[in-house]
């Protein structure tokens, strides 16, 4: 029996590796592996840098919701103190976060880190990210609602 159990575990491991190699991810295969890695990085950064104001899940903090249905809207949310601009696409959102978020320390994050945080927020809010990691160019393809 120990041999059968080892074979079973090995087969499960190989199946998981095959799924990952074919574009599978913790997001049900909805995004390419490089995009999934970017989103995972963004989640960690979000929890450390954004959650103190926006809440651990991106909703329910002392700042506006940035994750969930309606959170990433074209127009600023009612009562927004920092955001006054419209974000027709994720490119405007990304450019704005690179300048303003987190308040007073936006320059502490590299452009790739800002992109990872925005990719995480978009992914968690149900936006399709595409096959390439989010950057200033790919962000232009994602229309906000």
Image: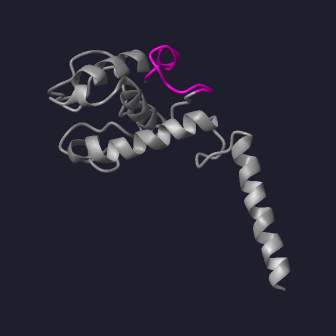
Residue found at x 35% / y 34%: 71
On screen, 143 above or below 45? above
Q: Is residue 68 visible?
A: no
Q: Is residue 80 left or right of residue 58?
A: left
Residue found at x 83% / y 71%: 7
Magenta span of residues: 130-144
User: In the rendered view of the protein, which quadrant contains the N terminus?
Assistant: bottom right
Q: Main secondary structure of the magenta part?
A: loop
User: In the rendered view of the protein, which quadrant contains the C terminus?
Assistant: top left
**Residue lying furthest bottom:** 1
Q: Position of residue 84 (x, y in %)?
A: 21, 18
Q: Camera-side residue: 3 or 74?
A: 3
Which quadrant of the structure image shows residue 74? Answer: top left
On screen, 12 above or below 142? below
Q: Is residue 138 visible?
A: yes
Residue found at x 41% / y 16%: 91
Q: Determine if the magenta segment contains residue 134.
A: yes
Which quadrant of the structure image shows residue 128? Answer: top right
Q: Determine if the magenta segment contains residue 18.
A: no
On screen, 28 above or below 105? below
Residue found at x 69% / y 39%: 23
Count of marks, rendered view: 0
Q: Camera-side residue: 139 or 104?
A: 104
Q: Position of residue 21 (x, y in %)?
A: 72, 42
How is colour applied across the structure in the image?
A: one colour
Q: Position of residue 62 (x, y in %)?
A: 17, 44
Q: Is residue 14 left or right of residue 91?
A: right
Q: Position of residue 36 (x, y in %)?
A: 56, 39
């Amino acid at each position: 029996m120990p041999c059968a159990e080892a074979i079973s575990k090995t087969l499960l491991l190989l199946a998981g590796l095959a799924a990952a190699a074919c574009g599978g991810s913790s997001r049900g295969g909805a995004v390419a592996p490089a995009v999934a890695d970017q989103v995972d990085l963004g989640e960690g950064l979000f929890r450390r840098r954004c959650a103190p104001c926006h809440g651990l899940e991106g909703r329910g903090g002392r700042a506006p919701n940035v994750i969930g249905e309606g959170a990433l809207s074209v127009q600023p949310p009612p009562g927004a103190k920092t955001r006054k601009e419209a974000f027709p696409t994720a490119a405007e959102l990304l450019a704005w976060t690179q300048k303003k978020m987190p308040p007073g320390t936006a320059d502490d994050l590299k452009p790739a880190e800002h992109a990872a945080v925005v990719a995480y927020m978009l992914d968690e809010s149900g936006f399709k990210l595409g096959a390439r990691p989010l950057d200033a160019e790919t962000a232009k393809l994602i229309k906000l609602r």
